[in-house]
Image: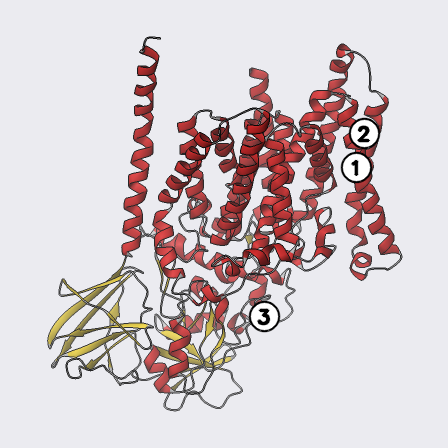
Amino acid sequence: MRSSWVRDALGLVWTIGAAVVVLLPALRPGVSLGPFDLLSRYGLTREAGVTVHNAAQADQIQQFVPWMNLAWHQVHSGQLPLWNPYSVLGMPLAFNWQSGVFSVPALVGYLVPVSHAFTAMVLTRLVVAGVGVYLLCRALGLGPLAATFGGTAFELSGPMVVQAAWPHASVTCWAGWILVAVVGLVRGRHRLRNVALLAVTLALAVYGGHPESLVAMGVAVVVFVVVFLVARARTEGGPVVRPLRDLVVGSVCGLGLGAPLLFPGAQLALLSARRYGTGVPAFPLSNIPNIVLVGLQGKVFDTTAYVGVIVLALAIVGAGVAWRRPVVPAFVAMVVVTALLTFFSPADQLLHLIPGGGTVTWNRAVMLFALALAVLGAFGIDALARSGRDRIAVGWMAAAFGALAFVVLCLAAAGELKLADTITRHRDSLIWPAVQSVVGLALAGLWWRARGGGAHSRRGARPFVVSGLALLLALETGFLLSSGIGFWSVSSGYLPTNPGITALQKSVGSSLVGFGDCGLQRYVTGPTASLGIWPDVNVAYGVREFEVYDPILPESYYRAYAAIGKGHIAASLSELGIFCARIKTVEQAQVFGVSYVLEPPTRFGGPPGSVPVGPVGAEELYRVPDAGDATVTPAPAVMASLATDAPGTPVPVTHPDPASWRVALHTTTASVLRLRLTNVPGWRATIDGRPVALTPWANGLMLETRVPAGSHVVELHYWPVAFSAGLVVAGVVLVGLVGAAPVAVVLRRRRQRRPT
């Protein structure tokens, strides 16, 4: 037992250490993880002579780093990170389906300095992923060496490393843990404990904050369960109904525990323009060689499938040698289905027939593809370690490495003969696959020549075999580390500033800044802003801007600007939640509460009627008179509505916290208080402590309320009813899970005392 404990400890140290090593570029003193170099291309942060490391990482700097920064500061101020007041007229933060502010990686990020919070998030995702698959392999009865291989291969695989800085990984990193509970429930072992484990880990995946990845993982797990149950029923005669019932109970409890995010998140998703978007299609079949090496075909996100020759070869060994174990066909089925979703476009197009299926990027399944291959590779390691020089296992190994060596040879020949330009340009990428193939074939040849002998001879040869397998583990880890380490973009500072940004912060304070021009917005390099601060980087700088990149941006923004824009077109990609409004007139600015407008220096003046403030960096700043976050206008007759562009008198607004507004006003007549605040479910208002109704205006974009004559205090707070309902549901489920343990103990004791 002591020996097993030591081996497991060493295996976990290796697995966790590998996750740390792959992030070493971001763990050095004085650096921060994130593509801050991209800021040199745009607006006030523009800087000449800066080389961009990886433009495809734009989402990290314009969403995830700023959102983490905002959530970190709100948490450290004793507030729940519910609202983002800096993007357009304010946006939900906790429920936007990508911030993941309640996820375990984010909770770890809150424990470190803000400049390292994002790094801590990414590292936590990798560690959770690796340890989960390690525990899964051990739960499947595999040895520590095999479990170490599986955990390391998954956490360092291309799908995990390349997407570890995205919320996809916050969801999928729990897949191994979920499968531990699933395997236990199908086998009928420790049912209550595994129901609780399934519920908790599924809820943690929900809080990861990426519904597409959650759906893709759900499809893969369902395929795994169905095949596992069928195979087990045929080979072992295991039950089907009871495991299914336990799995349904655990899944429902998991969704119940995730209700505080699911309920308000679903409510916002139904209001967003993103619901009309289309998912990215599957990778082309020409990208299949990317499974064994890095960057051979396609763009950055088309090359995330790499796992290496060793993983593929050992996965073939595991599937061939351990096929009679019911769980192995289940993992093979997972590989097939996720491979189809990743590389075969007709498969994901078929799922588009499901309501809402067209909005899902089904190639997110590539992460589950890597997990299934890693586990099958662990089966291969275990089969070879246990069988010593068994000719069947060694034969599978020789055939697998031989076939893959032939593939690598063909790719090398195509590169040398210049049959494919991409292969010719990336011939150096073939070095690792070639080395892995040669070492694998050499070990298979050595073990094949040494086969035979009795049981005693095979036991004596086991250390020799285990040493060779440890070499394969080290070689695979080296390949994955060398492939992943160079991916990260790091900076010697955190959110660099300059005199232009400082001048803008000082000039506008907490007022809303709009733009006289918006740059062309493209998704691959991120939305580009020719003025101001790149969205949503302004969030981290504490500057409010009338532009945004947010997946749950309400559709009302596009409707409102189309009605108020008076012929001017907003730069937008509505299916992605990208919006930047061109402010051409003072009237437009006043409607939206834009108090300042930035213009390029080449343009003559700001909107007619605006007041020049002066230069800000290389841009010109203009103040809009009579614009503010809140205005009062004399109320029209009862049952009559106020015109959208009706003039109003600004009134001061204070914010006790980011999710609260306080307006003190005095009027001589009954008036309409108009609030430049995004109309989403969750805002509640009181006037002098009494509840008051809020009604939408400007095509449903903003909120207003009627106030009687006199002095009054209007207060608003953001706390969705759906969030409260979710907390109640989660509390009930949690109490039920905790209370089920003593009840189960009592029932078990009664059954034991019952006379036979």
Few, some or many residues within 10 Å of mark 3 (<14, 14–19, 20+): some
Few, some or many residues within 10 Å of mark 2 (<14, 14–19, 20+): many
Amino acid bearing label 2: Ala
Real-space CA distance between mark 1 and mark 3, rounded to the nearest whole angstrom: 46 Å
Amino acid bearing label 1: Phe
Disc number lying in front (3 or 2):
2
**Depicted 329 relative to depicted 580: above or below:** above
Q: Mark 2 points at which residue?
A: 444
Say what secondary structure mark 3 lies in. helix
Q: Nearer the viewer, residue 114 or 9?
A: 9
Q: Which of 488 and 76 is in front in this view?
A: 488
In-image side of 166 versus 478 (left or right): left
Labels 3 and 2 touching (C-beta < 8 A): no
Name the quarter where the N terminus is drawn.
top right
Q: How many marks?
A: 3
Q: Nearer the viewer, residue 40 or 232?
A: 232
Q: Position of residue 520 (x, y in %)?
A: 55, 76
Real-space CA distance between mark 1 and mark 2, rounded to the nearest whole angstrom: 9 Å
Mark sitting on residue 686: none
Q: Which residue is drawn at 64% across and 38% down?
A: 332
Residue situated furthest top in the rendering: 756
Q: Where is residue 351 in the image (x, y as percent from the top left)?
A: 55, 55
Q: Name the residue under label 3.
A: 41
Real-space CA distance between mark 3 and mark 2, rounded to the nearest whole angstrom: 52 Å
Amino acid bearing label 3: Arg
Mark sitting on residue 401: 1
Q: Where is residue 145 in the image (x, y as percent from the top left)?
A: 65, 27
Disc number lying in front (1 or 3):
1
Name the quarter where the C terminus is drawn.
top left
**Depicted 179 relative to depicted 605: above or below:** above
Q: Which of 634 and 13 is in front in this view?
A: 634
Labels 1 and 2 touching (C-beta < 8 A): yes
